[in-house]
């Protein structure tokens, strides 16, 4: 009898468990508990520390700092990345970005730029309202107004270099309803949502794995259904005549610019993350979009040089793959400053083969095949090595001599490469004319988060799975052993599923706190900030609030500031002034005691650490001048046209910055256009992930062992992974074209 009772009890218990699983599966499928993510509530009390008057130039312009690339959890990748399963902090609505700018970073302006492909009509409406509220509350409450701009991200990518145009932030000047587009304009990423690969089984597994945070999983399901229910806009109607609730797509920059022309509102289009190997194919190049059709100098006046995802400034002649005359690809040999990942794939397989007692001849054959398989598996070549570990790849794929480079660097999409190119297909040569900005590209609504190098896992986008099992699933690793053979991977099939298994572990070591854009503005208001951005009188910083002036000065003391275009027949003279950023005190300075709600907000958002300057500045160590001479005939060698650095000028900074002057004595003889910009380099200080891969080197400078700073469960006890770093500011270029008949007074 007792046996029967036990069996009955076990049957009931098992049935209850199955019923429990069925209930939650059905609750996910039918979305019984999911609700839309709110845009949040902005705190209506004053805690603005009055910004220190950052000085003025001869025209009495103020220097204001901002962040024009910020994501809330309305961005799907931000939502997924902030799941506690991925070491995230939970959802961050747009209100968090507004209050972070006001209370934590104390910046002067910022922009929201959630991915258009994943913004629903409801979320776009809420985004508009939240930005309007942020401006209104800050204007009415704060001692010093934070100007908030509305925008979105046009997120395009392709595995074909000729059709890859990259990511671009759209920033609108006006926040008046009559000037705002009915909907953000997306790119082709809308065709494949990451949620398509996050099926119900995986969502249910995540629910069971992290039951205490089940609300985020249910709300994710709500987002999934909301996105799937959208209809694409008609392609044969102009933007203004389309309904509000459809998904509008522009597949190319040309299509995007045409739609913006139709909207007829003041807007900036800012390319960003251009040299990222995670999103750009190996042979991607600015040459594919240097034309009046695919580049519009009216809109594309700025480019993001630096962000929390790394630096995209510097050009190098090497490539991750070589293109043969027959259009086939081959793996290049290593050079001192670059180890191709395809080459290292061969070395991994060779080492495994030798360890398994294979012959030297056989292992070399397998290495050659491994390199070929890596290329044929592009862009998911790392999956061609079975059960690959991040340590085996050493520092392959990385620019070893670049300043804080983006992961898996693409030099063909560097800013310097863009400035050196010329399109000769028109009657008049056509060139890019970019001003430089820095941004955060933060995905936790932390606008201007680079003010202190703290809280790596919360203050950067370094994220990773909660446990080992989830890590294996994310990286598409198998349970098989590290066999000494490579394999072909059907990348197209994997990408078609909506998945994009990236090198999370190695990539997380490249995530930094964000950069900033600085403007030379007449006043502290929307119109003045916009005018500065539009005329390119702006500069980028790696996060520190360095002060920088860069001017061309004529013999009659006429000043052409950074961002200027001019013609000259005489050798130009330049003046540079730079002051280091203020050193920081710990904690915050404000009204926390007066307003208890501020204390809670500061603790939740700022983790008790705000922009809190002392009255002492860091020192400027040197000024580096970069000179670029754009092509004057087709096929002119790019490498010889980029002089970086052209000049290095030491600063004797004793706390008051430095002032220097230099002249280009070769300009007149060159008889061609020349582009000049400067970098102000600050004394070394500690920064998160400044060592990147962090290699142990042999006597010849080769990486022999990596010390990765993980973003996943292994990174909890690793701290902030600080290393020495020379923070810097990049001026916007001054474009000087030679004209023998021109005389500058």
Image (tube, rainbow, N blue to C red):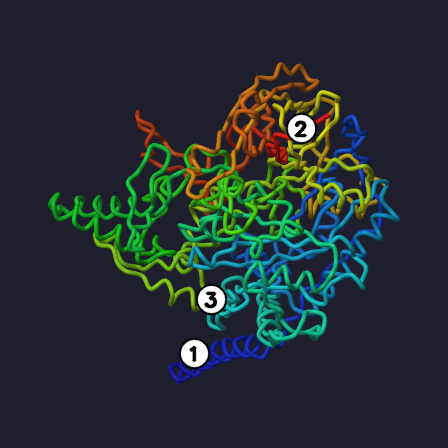
Q: Secondary structure at mark 1?
A: helix
Q: Residue at x 28, y 60 (%)?
A: 488
Dot 2 crowding, Cα within 10 Å, few <14, some 14–19, many 20+: many
| Disc on the earlier residue, 3 or 2 | 3
How far apart, in angstroms, are the residues tagged by discs 2 and 1?
A: 78 Å
| Disc on the earlier residue, 3 or 1 | 1
Which label lies toward us, 3 or 1? 3
> Can residue 692 be seen by looking at this rendering?
yes
Q: Are marks 3 and 1 in contact (CB under 8 Å)?
A: no
Number of dots carrying numbers: 3
Q: Which residue is mark 3?
A: 498
> Can residue 717 be seen by looking at this rendering?
no
Query: On the rendered image, what quadrant is the N terminus found in?
Result: bottom left
Q: Position of residue 352 (x, y in %)?
A: 21, 47
Q: Secondary structure at mark 3?
A: loop
The one of 489 and 517 positioned closer to us in this rendering? 517
How far apart, in angstroms, are the residues tagged by discs 3 and 2?
A: 46 Å
| Disc on the earlier residue, 2 or 1 | 1
In the rendered image of this protein, does residue 262 appear above or below residue 623? below
Q: Position of residue 80 (x, y in %)?
A: 55, 59
Q: Position of residue 716 (x, y in %)?
A: 50, 44
The one of 525 and 500 positioned closer to us in this rendering? 525
In the rendered image of this protein, does residue 614 appear above or below residue 475? above
Which label lies toward us, 2 or 1? 2
Q: Which residue is mark 2?
A: 550
Which dot marks residue 10?
1
Q: Secondary structure at mark 2?
A: strand
* Residue furthest front in the image: 741
Q: Residue at x 67, y 42 (%)?
A: 448
């Amino acid at each position: 009898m007792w046996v029967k009772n036990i069996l009955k009890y076990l049957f009931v218990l098992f049935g209850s468990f199955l019923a429990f699983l069925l209930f939650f599966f059905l609750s996910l499928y039918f979305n019984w508990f999911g609700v839309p993510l709110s845009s949040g509530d902005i705190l209506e009390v004053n805690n603005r520390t009055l910004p220190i008057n950052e000085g003025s130039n001869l025209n009495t312009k103020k220097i204001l700092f901002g962040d024009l690339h910020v994501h809330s959890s309305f961005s799907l990748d931000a939502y997924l990345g902030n799941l506690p399963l991925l070491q995230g902090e939970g959802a961050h609505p747009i209100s968090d970005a507004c209050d972070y700018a006001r209370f934590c970073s104390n910046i002067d302006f910022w922009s929201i730029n959630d991915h258009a492909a994943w913004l629903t009509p409801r979320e776009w409406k809420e985004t508009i309202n939240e930005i309007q509220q942020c401006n209104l509350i800050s204007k009415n409450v704060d001692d010093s107004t934070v100007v908030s701009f509305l925008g979105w991200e046009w997120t395009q990518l392709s595995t074909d270099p000729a059709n890859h145009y990259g990511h671009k932030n759209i920033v609108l000047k006006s926040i008046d309803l009559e000037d705002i587009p009915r909907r953000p304009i997306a790119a082709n990423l809308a065709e494949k949502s990451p949620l398509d690969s996050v099926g119900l089984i995986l969502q249910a597994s995540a629910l069971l794995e992290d039951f205490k945070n089940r609300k985020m999983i249910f709300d994710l399901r709500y987002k999934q259904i909301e996105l799937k229910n959208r209809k694409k806009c008609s392609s044969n109607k102009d933007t203004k005549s389309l309904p509000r609730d459809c998904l509008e797509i522009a597949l190319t920059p040309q299509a995007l610019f045409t739609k913006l022309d139709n909207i007829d509102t003041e807007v900036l289009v800012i390319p960003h993350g251009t040299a990222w190997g995670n999103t750009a194919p190996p042979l991607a190049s600015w040459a594919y979009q240097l034309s009046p059709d695919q580049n519009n100098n009216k809109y594309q006046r700025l480019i993001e040089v630096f962000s929390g995802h790394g630096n995209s400034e510097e050009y190098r002649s090497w490539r991750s793959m070589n293109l043969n005359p027959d259009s086939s690809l081959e793996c290049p040999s290593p050079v001192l400053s670059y180890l191709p990942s395809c080459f290292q794939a061969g070395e991994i397989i060779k080492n495994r083969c030798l360890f398994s007692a294979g012959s030297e001849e056989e292992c070399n054959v397998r290495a050659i095949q491994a390199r070929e398989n890596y290329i044929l598996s592009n862009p998911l070549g790392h999956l061609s090595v079975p059960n690959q570990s991040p340590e085996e790849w050493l520092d392959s794929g990385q620019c070893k001599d670049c300043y804080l480079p983006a992961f898996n660097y693409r030099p063909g999409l560097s800013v310097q490469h863009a400035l050196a190119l010329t399109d000769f297909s028109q009657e008049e040569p056509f060139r890019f004319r970019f001003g430089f900005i820095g941004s955060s590209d933060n995905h936790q609504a932390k606008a201007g988060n680079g003010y202190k190098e703290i809280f790596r896992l919360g203050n950067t986008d370094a994220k990773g799975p909660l446990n080992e099992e989830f890590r294996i699933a994310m990286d598409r690793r198998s349970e098989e052993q590290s066999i000494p053979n490579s394999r072909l991977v059907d990348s197209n099939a994997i990408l078609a599923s909506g998945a994009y298994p990236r090198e999370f572990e190695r990539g997380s070591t490249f995530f930094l706190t964000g950069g900033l854009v600085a403007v030379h503005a007449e006043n502290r208001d929307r119109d003045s900030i916009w005018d500065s951005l539009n005329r390119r009188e702006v500069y980028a910083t790696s996060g520190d609030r360095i002060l920088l002036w860069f001017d061309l000065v004529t013999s009659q003391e006429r000043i052409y500031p950074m961002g200027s275009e001019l013609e000259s027949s005489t050798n130009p003279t330049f003046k540079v002034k730079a002051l280091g950023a203020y050193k920081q005190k710990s904690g915050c300075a404000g009204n926390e005691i007066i307003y208890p709600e501020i204390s809670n907000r500061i603790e939740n958002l700022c983790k008790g650490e705000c922009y809190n300057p002392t009255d002492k500045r860091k020192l400027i160590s040197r000024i580096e001048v970069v000179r670029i001479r754009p092509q004057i005939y087709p096929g002119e060698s790019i490498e010889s046209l980029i002089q970086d650095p052209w000049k290095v000028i030491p600063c004797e900074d004793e706390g008051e910055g430095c002032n220097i002057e230099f002249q280009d004595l070769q300009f007149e003889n060159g008889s061609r256009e020349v582009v000049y910009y400067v970098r102000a380099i600050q004394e070394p200080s500690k920064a998160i992930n400044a060592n990147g891969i962090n290699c142990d080197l042999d006597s010849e400078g080769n990486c022999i062992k990596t010390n990765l700073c993980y973003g996943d469960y292994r990174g909890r006890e690793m701290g902030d992974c600080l290393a020495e770093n020379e923070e810097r500011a990049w001026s916007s270029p001054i474009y000087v074209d030679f004209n023998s008949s021109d005389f500058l007074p």
